Amino acid sequence: GQNIDQPTEMTATEGAIVQINCTYQTSGFNGLFWYQQHAGEAPTFLSYNVLDGLEEKGRFSSFLSRSKGYSYLLLKELQMKDSASYLCAVRLLYNQGGKLIFGQGTELSVKP
Amino acid sequence: DGGITQSPKYLFRKEGQNVTLSCEQNLNHDAMYWYRQDPGQGLRLIYYSQIVNDFQKGDIAEGYSVSREKKESFPLTVTSAQKNPTAFYLCASSKEKADRGNQPQHFGDGTRLSIL
């Protein structure tokens, strides 16, 4: 079976740093994606990791440890507009359909 | 501009009725996907297609049907057999290559389906 776990919700303060964790157990692995989804809107792509280590993109960074089945998304200098749901997704191998398996999402609330 | 277009934005279904959700992309992407999202939950895969004229069931295919006659189009039919169709439906596409997994899926704006 496929399983991806994320915290259901988190709260942080404007200007602070927040780390959203994701653990996974899947039958195959061809990369891990993070998406941001504002209420009622489509998810938008944030980051991709396939090798161990940290990928940085402006205020957003994502880390992967394949041996631990673990990733995190780090958001720095939080802004009110960062209030959204953050989805962790694992891509399966091409011969498994190349499908994305999504976690339930972490609802982040940024307070003034 | 290239992108994914879903229509309609809102759709209402009567009892016993089949409804079809449209998804069109002009990104020249090989793969297309349909997801269902219920309130407070993640995305669940209904059907996907890696190439034209071929598609596979996802995790919750019962009560749904699809076709992939053209590369650009992947319509989803919600049949009367789907007893709880009220949800947010998202279509996605990606440039799918066997040796490259780093192509993100791009999403349409979604269709919100409700029961009358």
Image: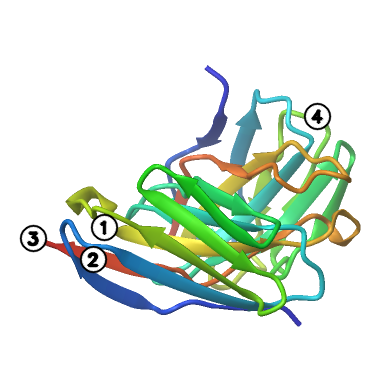
Q: Are marks 3 and 2 on the same chain?
A: yes
Task: Say which amino acid is labelled 1.
Answer: Ser
Quarter of the image where one finds residue A106: bottom left
Residue at image mark 2: A109
Q: Nearer the viewer, mark 3 or mark 1?
A: 3
Residue at image mark 1: A83
Q: Nearer the viewer, mark 3 or mark 2?
A: 3
Q: Are marks 3 and 4 in contact (CB under 8 Å)?
A: no
Instruction: Point out the tag, 2 or 1, that comes first from the N-terminus.
Output: 1
The secondary element bearing badge 2 is classed as strand
Q: Nearer the viewer, mark 1 or mark 4?
A: 1
Q: Are marks 3 and 1 on the same chain?
A: yes
Q: Are marks 1 and 4 in contact (CB under 8 Å)?
A: no
Q: Are marks 2 and 1 in contact (CB under 8 Å)?
A: yes
Q: Chain of mark 1?
A: A
- Residue nearest the viewer, comparing A67 with A31: A67
Task: Say which amino acid is labelled 4.
Answer: Lys
